[in-house]
Amino acid sequence: MNDRQILTRDLLVLFSLTGWGLSLPYFGSDFMVSMGLTCLMYIALSSSWGLFCGNTRYLSLATSAFFGIGAYTCALQLEQLGWAATIALGAGVAAAVAVVMGAAVLHLRGTYFAVLTFGMTELIRHAVTYYEKSVTGTVGRVLTVVPERDTIYLTVLCLAVITVGLSMWVRRTRLGLALVGIGADEQRAQTLGVDTRWVKLLGFAMTAAVAGAVGAAMSVRWTYIDPHTVFNPFIGFQTVLIALIGGAMTLWGPLIAAVVFSLLAETLRLQAPQVYMMSLGLLLILCVLYLPAGLASLRWDTWKIWRDDIRAWWKERRREWTGEKERDKRRAREQRLV
């Protein structure tokens, strides 16, 4: 398929999934809506993470920092500004923090970048905790003005659709090409005229803006927030796992993995949390070994390759168990002697 056909297909899939998402609050139970809300949250977070980190191969662990910044922005400004303006402000504040953070650490790569982003996340969390306890004299924030359930759900759905649409758009622009070039060979991209510093800052800020907006929208789900809840590192780690297992460089991989993870979380986390964590680890190991491009790379040919590999392995093991392999070696030695 050419690029126009791929775009048409992607838009049709996005519209279809959006229609299904819009219908969920009208026929689903509260439990289904809650599970759908969690799924949409991770679709937005993992898709935005893959937009920057998947293309540039920068492993950012700062998602929970931007999520928490958006949540606290909502807690502080929701009564004064209203719902839509607070979501936009949460995205803007998170993007501004990302620009400052990115200016300090985006010249690094690999383990150093990952450790520093995680360290800055912890720094922000402890700074907010210190401010709450020492200056305001509180432990957390109570949100007294809380929108209705459907308003929260539709807002997060809108953010998820916007994030996937933004990913589709960026992939077809010079910005997307520059991000991929940085991931492939940053020095070569510089020699070709790409201003890698500003491209990385812009991509990092876009990821942070989405996380901040999602954090602001999801904060009212709890009605009471504290730094430990909204700056929880597990949010960032799970976002990274979802993106990597689904396929960080693909459009639909994070969405597929977010659905799988949400179902696993709701069915296993409360009843068997150890099994849930083991399932996450097993999925990650299997994807790294057999699906390096993620779940989105699964094709019919992939199943055929796996089938042929299993058959070849079984045939080899059977030859060893029956002694046929040893007999073949003995015959070969006898022929060489003759």
Image: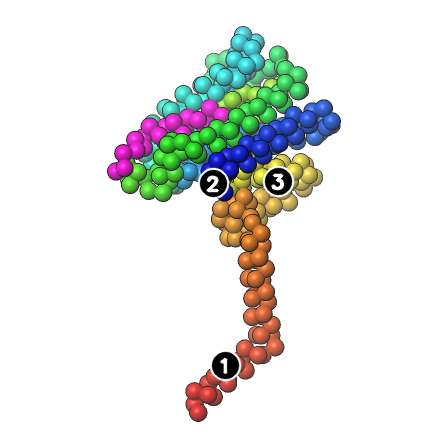
| Residue density around tag 2, few if under 14, some if 14–19, many if 20 or more, within 10 Å | few
Q: Nearer the viewer, residue 84 or 170?
A: 170
Marks 1 and 3 close (CB-CB < 8 Å) = no
Q: Magenta segment, which residues?
A: 191-211
Q: Which residue is mark 2?
A: 2
Q: Nearer the viewer, residue 166 or 235?
A: 166
Residue 82 in which image quadrant: top right
Disc 1 on helix, strand or loop?
Answer: helix
Residue 329 is tagged as 1
Badge 3 density bin: few <14, some 14–19, many ≥20, Cα 10 Å: some
Dominant secondary structure (helix, strand or loop) of the stretch shown in magenta: helix
Q: Amino acid at mark 2?
A: Asn
The percent position of residue 299, horizontal first and vertical second, equals 56, 49
Q: How is the image coloured?
A: rainbow
Instruction: Give the CA distance from mark 3 to mark 2.
Output: 30 Å
Q: Up-down: is 272 above or below 25?
A: below
Q: Earlier in the sequence, mark 3 or mark 2?
A: 2
Q: Residue at x 63, y 23 (%)?
A: 153
Q: State the separation of the CA atoms marked 1 and 2.
A: 52 Å
**Mark 1 vs 3, N-terminal side:** 3
Residue that badge 3 annotates:
260
**Residue under the point 48% across and 35% down:** 4
Choose the circle earlier in sequence order: 1 or 2. 2
Residue 161 at x, y percent in the picture: 55, 27
**Marks 1 and 3, how far apart at CA:** 48 Å
Instruction: State the SS at label 2.
Output: loop
Q: Nearer the viewer, residue 302 or 318?
A: 302
